[in-house]
Amino acid sequence: MLNLDQIAGSPALSANTARKWMGTAATALVVCLGAPTTASAQAKTPIAKENMVLVASVINTTNPYMISNIEGAKALSAKLGIPLEIVNSNGSSQTEISKIQAILAGGKTVIMFVNTVASSDAPTIVDAVKQAKGYVTIWWNNPAEHSPKDVGDNFVAYQKIPGVLSGRCGADAIGNALGGKGNVVMLPGVQDSTTSKTRVAGFTAQLKEKFPDIKILESRPSNWDPQLGNRNAKDLIVKYGDKINGVWSADDGMQIGAMQAFENAGLLNKVKFASDGLYPETLADLKSGRGDKAIVGETFHRGYMASAVGLYTAYLTATGKITPSELPKEKRESLFELSCVTPDNYQQYTKYDEPDAAAKFVDAMIEKGPWDTSPMKLIGAGPEEMPK
Amino acid sequence: MDKRKLLHGDWQGATSWVVILALVIIVFSFINPRFASIENLRNVLVQASVPLMLVVGATLVILMGSIDLSVQGIMGAAGMVWILMSPNARGGIDYGAWAWVVATGIGLILGLLSGVIHTLFRVPSFVVTLGTWNVGVGLATILYGDSLLPSLTSEALSQWPTRLTLGLPNSFWLASIVVLAGILLIGFTQLGRGILAIGNNEPLAVVNGVPVIPIKIAAFGIAGLLSGFAGILATMQLGSGAPGVGAGQLFTVIPAAVIAGTALSGGEGGMVRSALGVFLLILLNNGLVLAGVDPNYQSGVFGAILVIAIVAVDWPQRDRLRVAK
């Protein structure tokens, strides 16, 4: 294959001359073949469905949230009739990036949803997708300074559910259950993850503002890992014993581990728990009132909604139905609705876990658009503001 | 090699570690008196039980100069098999004791597989066990599928590890039996002697008629079996099944064995020292939480204490070596 360096490598031939030659040759070729001569005409050519591929990249395939991400992508793929590829990052940024690059090399127009392993992965992935002329929506983790509007239409949107609201929900639930008095321990996720940081900020701010008599005894990051949540809870039980009245975890996985530790210590009946995600097991515990109605608060959002909305936004861009650069800020850096769940209102949410729930959500989303589908409507523009 | 001398060496090396452990306990108890409470002792014993079981298998393999990285994968696979055959939230049949047999059997098979490929096809153990690690994770992931989290519905089972027998948690009794069996295996059996002979000088062992291949396969098999066993115990402790139930264990177990003096090159070390290494790591983590060390500083403080402890223990050893020269 001829390349510019080889031509320019001749001492008698400068790089500039080589470029001019190649430019002339390319124009001649285009004219001969009768192809459209303007770039804009090329961009507006609709991409045929058989030339598209949906890609959903998830952090792992065992966490219930990630499984739900896959479910949403499958439902949309079935609805649109476009094949789907799943990228399992196995918790590793390197794996994630290399698998995505392999798919991009496949040549089809890629419509991608990425639940990034770490914020720092987003620029690399977005850049690769842009080079391959694909369209990507990033969910959850993205550096604050990496804005879609600065990258262009290939970085369709950065979407997330506000963590601060999640933390505030948990604080309200525990605060009310304890009657505004008592001691709590916190189990954040991976310490430097944006999602964990925002949830922690929301929880601590809400306690400070609304329940000043509730004291935070200690905070032990548990890396989203149920085992570590379990171990840390055991240590905290030894350290504080029955002084602990409430436990807040940044997600249900860690809460599941922590609840087991309190149950084994015979303390489950005396402690209140709140967390994020309303995993099926947590829902079952909420329904059965495990402990003495130990779970007092949860938040509801589903992975299938995130992936369906993310992919569909990118799909609408690929098919020319929306032009991201013409969209208002909140549709490019989007914060979506989160619902606070309590033992009194959880029944409203069980329908979203029915076997056909993802398909129903996709149907509703295609009818109403990606920003207006209940229970995950667009509620504002990012980046998320941290409480003071 | 004289087996009494070997055993003696293991215990002798262990003495300085006992002193270090005692120091750690005294310092942390001053910072927070609850550290030395019976309640915390039981807590530490429960937390140590899974890595204790694993470190026995890991030590057998490391003593031969090989390595077993498959720990976490086998734990995941065995844990998932066990919980799906026990009373769990997904329903299904409760197979009782068969759940244990099948789950540990999977560990054994994966371990034997590593041993066979390593010896007969002469593939480095690092590479083979990296493969079996992933096979285990893959198996666990398939079993997990995309349905409900399989949580234990039998309270008797989920609370068994922390329940007390003669004042100590059941999981610790189980781990103690395994460690004791490991000590006996290394000190008093032909298999143990063979493992040490291979680690000391494999070509010489071959010349002396030591059945190297069967011994290696057996050691990997035992390590796999114990990883399976540990996977069950970890699943019970968590109260639910997850393919990642062994997360982080590999980097507790191998460092625990190595820092306590089991040489990665093989032939040197022993069960007692490896077990003490586990206790040091668990006590440090537990102590730092009880001492209220800020999570931002915990990793740094943990590493610093560990380095100081290792230097302190090895210092006299280093001196003796210099005199001998």
Image (cartoon, coloured by chain):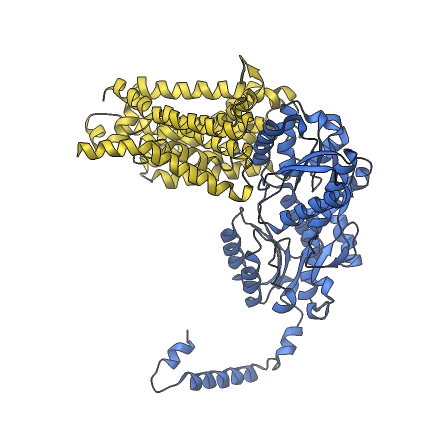
Residue A152 vs A120, above or below: the answer is below
Q: Is residue A248 left or right of residue B141?
A: right
Let me know if residue B297 appears in the view. yes
Most distant residue in the left direction: B325
Residue B131, position in %: x, y?
43, 40
Q: Is residue A29 left or right of residue A82?
A: left
Most distant residue in the top direction: B166
Let me know if residue B56 appears in the view. no
Residue A236 vs A140, above or below: the answer is above
User: How many marks on residues?
Assistant: 0
Of B24 and B107, the residue lying toward us: B24
Residue B173, position in %: x, y?
49, 18
Residue A337, position in %: x, y?
76, 51
Residue at 35% from the left image edge and 26% from the top image edge: B16
Colour in which the image shows chain B? yellow
Image quadrant assignment for residue A228: top right
Residue B115, position in %: x, y?
36, 32
The chain letter of the blue chain reads: A
Residue A245 vs A116, above or below: the answer is above
Of B176 and A68, the residue lying toward us: B176
Residue A260 vs A277, above or below: the answer is above
Question: Which corner quadrant holds the N terminus of chain A?
Answer: bottom left
Of B95 and A198, the residue lying toward us: A198
Image quadrant assignment for residue B210: top left
